[in-house]
Amino acid sequence: MARSTRFAKLETRSARLKLPIAKKPIFVKIGPGVGLGYRRNRTAGTWVARVADGKGANWTKAIGAADDFEEANGTDVFDFWNAQERARSIGRLGAAGEGDDAKLATVEKALDRYEANLKLRSGDVDNVKRVRSHLTDALRQKTVALLNEHELRSWRDDLAKDMEPASVNRTTTILKATLNLAADTDARIPSRRPWEIGLATILGAEKSRNVVLPERIIRLIIVAAYEQSAEFGLLVETAAVTGARVSQLGRLEIQNVQGDRSDVRLMMPSSKKGRGKKKISLRPVPVTADLAKRLLRGTGDNPKNARLLVKPSGEAWKKSDHSRLFERAVNRVAKQEGVNLDDPKKAKLGDYEPSQVTIYALRHSNIVRQILANVPIRVVAAHHDTSVKMIEQNYSDYIGDHADALARGALFAVEPANDSAVEADAVSRTAMVA
């Protein structure tokens, strides 16, 4: 271990607090090309590492708070000696070597590693694509160890200008997971504080904006889907009846249809959502006998493990294959309903703009339909491959209405007293007092 450098002005909190408040840090050299700086603030001071880049310039990186008013914890509050160790570990990235394993990862490289980790855990790699599609080039090429909370917060806030808060939170959560994995595997990344603060969750985004459609509109959308192709119509009808995600429907096999039972059902594959390596399991979901017949019609001599729902080309449906087709179906229904699509501000299909109605509206509508039909929340969650917590969080308004109706049926009722009798009793009591 390198010997610590002595510097009386910075060694103790009492010495540091005698320094004037200033924006520019006081630096002391602690090793070849590495300096440790202290910036005196009105509150606790800040430690800063300064590292030479080998080209006549240098870069700086905030390490954490000084132990001016609270004890050092080695995480976000450091004393003079801890700060030196952390500054040296940051400085080693400049002399780490030329191999890929020796270099500190950029955000882009961290995303590559997180994507590989998701594949290993059978996770949804589309999560990484979502982050990549929104990253700026500057942020993409930034070294993870040099990220700061200000640039991450600025990026998050820019997303919020064009995206719903809940969508921003989903995107930043993925990036935070990416950066946490990078920190888990590289001790030279000094702190997770930049993304814990810069990518903090936007409060109030939990308010659900799920699109819930009346059954009449859903039936019209199904008809419009069948008008495009029998294969697409079958996908949309199955989504409406089961409330399953398209990713689940795309993995259905012919053998998953159990149509020879009195309680006809599909054995629905689970999704890949959630943490850890998730084993794909099958869960029974009830369907109508007519839908089961339509699903099996045309499967002929195909093997039992062949895909059940396929595109007209015979290929399996993928996550984004349906978007434009569903948009056409929605717009066709909107025109039938007299909606003027040329005026986006006034165009409404029920309570929603047509652009808000995606195939996920069928899932939301199915969940709400079951809640209002007195299906227990735990059963609703199981049928839709989600948790009770997520159902309560995203559909709380509907659950509240449902619970109110149930509780009202159990109200304790008291027969009202005869008004004339109450009045006569009151007069009698008044006379007695007089």
Image (cartoon, helix red, strand yellow):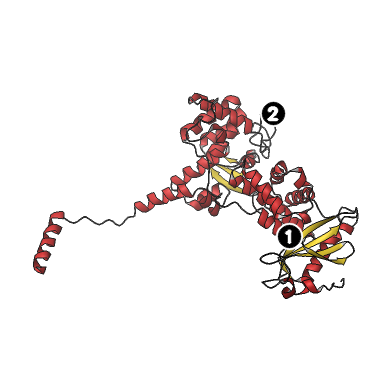
- Give above or below for 3 relative to 328: below
**Does residue 270 appear anywhere in the picture?**
no
Residue with the mark numbered 2: 313
Q: Are discs 1 and 2 less than 8 Å apart at CB?
A: no
Tell us which disc is closer to us: 1 or 2. Answer: 1
Which residue is more in the foreground, 351 or 118?
Answer: 351
Q: Is residue 87 left or right of residue 320?
A: right
**Does residue 402 appear anywhere in the picture?**
yes
**Percent coordinates x, y for residue 271 in the rendering:** 63, 47
Which residue is more in the foreground, 165 or 38?
Answer: 38
- Give above or below for 4 relative to 117: below
- Residue kind at label 2, given as amino acid type: Ser
Q: Is residue 240 left or right of residue 68?
A: left
- Give above or below for 101 relative to 254: below
Q: Is residue 295 left or right of residue 17?
A: left
Q: Secondary structure at mark 1?
A: loop
Which residue is more in the foreground, 171 or 276?
Answer: 171
- Residue drawn 69% across and 73% down? 71
**Percent coordinates x, y for residue 274 in the rendering:** 64, 52
Quadrant placement of the C terminus: bottom left
- Residue kind at label 1, given as amino acid type: Lys
Q: Between marks 1 and 2, how big is the CA–CA gap?
A: 65 Å
Quadrant of the rendered image containing residue 101: bottom right
Q: Earlier in the sequence, mark 1 or mark 2?
A: 1
Q: Is residue 237 left or right of residue 254?
A: left
Residue with the mark numbered 1: 23
| Disc assigned to residue 42 | none
Instruction: Specify the farthest residue to the front.
Output: 20
- Label 2 neighbourhood size at 10 Å, few (<14), some (14-19), many (20+)? few
- Residue drawn 82% across and 72% down? 7
- Residue drawn 48% across and 50% down? 396
